Amino acid sequence: MPLSSSPLQPRPTLLLLGLTLGLLIATPSHAEDIEQLKREAKELVEQLRQELDDVRRERRALEAERDALDSERRALEARQPPTAPAAADTAETAPTGETAAAAAETDRKVGVLAREVQTLKEKIVLPDDKELKSFYGLGPAASKVYQVNRGLSIGGYGEGNFSGKVNDVGDDYSKADFLRFVLYTGYKFTDKILLNAELELEHATTSSTVSASDGSFSLEFAYLDFLLSEYANLRTGLFLAPLGFVNQIHEPVYFFGNHRPELDHEIIPTTWRNLGVGLFGNLHEDVRYEAYVSTGLNAKGFSSSGIRGGRQKGNRVRAEDPAGNIRLDYTPHQVPGALVGMSTFFGDSGQHQDFAGENVSAFLSLFDVHAEYQHRGIWLRSVAAFGSLNDAKQLSVASGEPIAERFQGWYMEAGYDVMPYLYQLLPDYLPESHYLAPFFRFEHIDPQESVASGFERDKTKEFDLYTLGVSYKPHPQVVFKLDYRNFVQRQGNRPDEINLGLGFVF
C-alpha cells in the first residue's frame, strides 16, 4: 500500500500494524510467552494510537494559530483609511512583515511535525534496514533481537523443495514439500534482558493428507538472556544444543544443499533443544564458549537408527537425569573467516526407567570437532562427531533391535562463489551483487559402528554420501538450490536424488 502524501491523515499504517500483530498473536499456542507477547503487542498498538492522537491535536492547534494570524492580517488590512494611501502603505508594510514571519514559523513547525510523522510511519511499515548478523552462535535471522534498541523484533525463514528419486527403489517416490516456515519473535526489555523464541510450522499443515502423515507446529526455542558482560552472560529456558554447525545455524541461506548434512540428522539429532540454564561469552577476544546444564535424552526413544528418537523437545520432559553441554570456538583474528572448535554433550539417559527388568544409567557422551573457513567467496567446512552409549545391551534387549554402543560420522564440503568472474566476462548481462556457488560435499555416516555382544550390526545404516550442487542468491536473503545426492550404502540400495528448492530469511 503506498504511503499517504498527507502525513496527518488517518493512518492505514496503524491498521496494518494492528492486523499484522493480530495475526501473529492469534497463532494457537498455550505457552505463557505467547500470552505475554499478545499483551505487549496490544500495549504497543495503544501507545502508537495515543502518539498519533497527540500529533493530530498539535496539528489542529497549529492550524488554529495560523488561521488566527491570517484573520489578524486581514483585519489590519481592513482598518487602513482609503483616503490616505501613503499612510496606509506605511501602516500595511509593518504588520504584513510580522504576519509573514509568523506564518513562515507556523509552516516550519508543521513541516517538522510532518517529517516526524513520516519517520514514524516508515519505522512501522519499513523497519530499520540492518544487515543480518550472527550473534552468540545463532543464525543471523534468529539473532535479530540482539540488534534492536528496545522492544519487539520479528524475523524468520522458510524453505521448500522438490526431490526426484533416480532409479526408484521399493516404496520410495519423488516428493515436493514445503519443509518449514519459521517465525522468530524477540523482545528486548532492557539493554541487558531479552527474550528470544522460534515458532516452526513443518510440512505446511498439522493435518494428515492422502499423501502423508500430519506435520507439526512447535516451539523450537524460547529463552531469556541476561547480558551481564563480555565474559559471562546467563541463558535460561528452552535453547538449542550447541553442537556442530547446523543445529544452531540451520537457516537455508547459510548452508549448501536442499537437505542439511546427514551427519546433522543421524549422529547429531538436529534440530535438538533442551531445557536448562548456563553461561556463554568470551574467554578471550578470539575464544567463545557456551556451557549449560540441561535436561537429557530419554533412552526409551533410542533405536537401531540412533539416538534421534530420544529427544524430548521441551514437552513434559523426564528430568530425572541432567546433562552437560560445553562448546568452545576459536576464531583467530590473524586469519579472518577461520573458525575451529569442539563441543560435547554428556549425561545419563535412562531417566530412572525399567529396561528389560533393570534400571540402567544409559550414560551418553557425544563429541564433535568442527572447522570452517569463509573468505572472498571461498567456503570450506568440516565436522566429525563421535558418540558412545553405556548399557547398550540392556537397551537392545528391551527394544528388540541393536542399539549402538558407538556411532560416528563426518563430512567435508567446499564451495566457491564464481559470480565475480562471470560478471567480468558478461558485465552487461549479469548483476555483480548476485551469488553463484557450485559446491561439493562428502559424508561418511555409521550410526552402528559397534553394538553389544549378542547383536549384529545393521549394515544398511552405514553409507557414504556424495552431494554435488549449486546455490544461487539473487539477494543475500534469498536462495535457489540445485543438487544431486548419490548414496553408497555398505549393504542394500538407496535411490539417488536430484533436488531443486528455494529458501529465504528475513
Image (cartoon, rainbow, N blue to C red):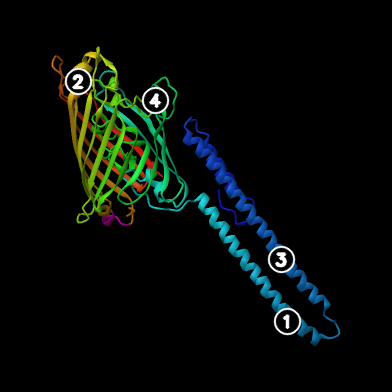
**Which of labels 3 and 1 is toward the front?**
3
Of the two numbered discs 4 and 1 on the same chain, state the one appearing first in sequence.
1
Query: What residue is pinned by disc 4?
Result: 316
Q: Write down the residue under mark 1.
A: 94
Mark 2, secondary structure of its residue: helix
**Mark positioned earlier in the residue sequence (3 or 2):** 3
Q: Residue at x 33, y 33 (%)?
A: 273
Q: Distance between the residues labelled 4 and 1?
A: 82 Å
What residue span does the magenta drawing correspond to? Answer: 423-427
What's the residue type where badge 1 is placed?
Ala
The disc, 2 or 1, on the residue closer to the chain's N-terminal end is 1
**The furthest residue to the bottom:** 86
Give amino acid for label 2.
Ala
- Residue underneath mark 2: 392
Q: Do the residues labelled 3 and 2 touch (CB within 8 Å)?
A: no
* Of the two numbered discs 4 and 1 in the rendering, the one whose residue sits closer to the viewer: 4
Q: Distance between the residues labelled 4 and 3?
A: 65 Å
Kind of residue at badge 3:
Glu
Q: Looking at the picture, does residue 371 appear above or below residue 204? A: below
Residue at screen point 21% across, 16% down: 394
Q: In this view, does 481 lie to the left or right of 123?
A: left
Q: Nearer the viewer, residue 492 or 168?
A: 492
